[in-house]
Image (spheres, rainbow, N blue to C red):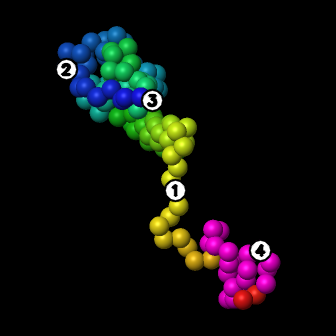
């Protein structure tokens, strides 16, 4: 899947979008006041198969755009998840660490709380 390159809107297109929205932010449904920081936002992110069409664009408050883009359920997290799922579909994984932790989960030994080391399978102290 190829991501469409981001394009900028002209000032006239921004004004036309704002007029079509009747001066309201589509994310929070509040009025956009002149002089307030705003952004041109893709309603469906380009990284999630969105397009640059005017039907997928909106003028929103800068705060609303940040909430939509960042955070645990934001666009960036969803894009990263989609990329991981796509990679896993084709069998690509993160792979093993080049510097595995000694006595870690992949090691046959485990460290004991008292400071010793034991065999992970038998539990025998070494």
Of labels 1 and 4, earlier in sequence is 1
From the viewer's perspective, tell me whether residue 36 is left or right of residue 71. left
- Label 1: how many residues lie within 10 Å, few (<14), some (14-19) or many (20+)? few
Residue shown at the point (47%, 67%) measured from the top left = 98
Judged by depth in the image, the label closer to the viewer, 1 or 3, is: 1
Which residue does the numbered mark 4 point to in the structure image? 121
From the viewer's perspective, tell me whether residue 121 is left or right of residue 63. right
In the rendered image, the quadrant that contains the N terminus is top left
Which residue does the numbered mark 1 point to in the structure image? 95
Q: 121 or 80: which is nearer to us? A: 121
Q: Which mark is residue 65?
A: none
From the top left corner, tell me how far across and down residue 31 is, in percent: 39, 22
- Kindly indicate the quadrant of the structure image that contains residue 112: bottom right
Which residue does the numbered mark 3 point to in the structure image? 48
Q: Tell me how far mark 1 sits from mark 2, CA to CA.
A: 47 Å
Q: Tell me how far mark 4 sits from mark 2, CA to CA.
A: 68 Å
- Kindly indicate the quadrant of the structure image that contains residue 13: top left
- Label 3: how many residues lie within 10 Å, few (<14), some (14-19) or many (20+)? some
Which residue does the numbered mark 2 point to in the structure image? 11
Judged by depth in the image, the label closer to the viewer, 3 or 4, is: 4
- Give the secondary structure at mark 1: loop
- Label 2: how many residues lie within 10 Å, few (<14), some (14-19) or many (20+)? few
Residue shown at the point (77%, 74%) measured from the top left = 121
Q: 70 or 112: which is nearer to us? A: 112
Of labels 3 and 4, earlier in sequence is 3
Q: Is residue 18 magenta?
A: no
Q: Does the magenta stretch include residue 119?
A: yes
Q: Which residue appears farthest toward the front when viewing the image?
A: 91
Marks 3,4: beta carbons within 8 A? no
Of labels 1 and 2, earlier in sequence is 2
In the image, the segment drawn in magenta is: 104-124
């Amino acid at each position: 899947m190829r991501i469409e390159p981001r394009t900028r809107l002209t000032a006239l297109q921004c004004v036309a979008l704002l007029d079509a929205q009747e001066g309201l932010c589509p994310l929070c449904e509040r009025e956009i006041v002149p002089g307030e920081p705003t952004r041109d936002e893709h309603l469906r992110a380009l990284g999630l198969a969105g397009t640059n069409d005017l039907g997928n664009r909106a003028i929103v408050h800068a705060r609303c755009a940040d909430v939509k883009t960042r955070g645990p359920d934001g666009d960036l997290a969803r894009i990263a998840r989609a990329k991981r799922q796509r990679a896993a579909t084709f069998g690509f994984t993160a792979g093993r660490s080049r510097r595995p932790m000694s006595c870690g989960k992949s090691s046959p030994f485990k460290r004991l709380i008292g400071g010793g080391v034991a065999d992970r399978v038998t539990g025998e102290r070494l």
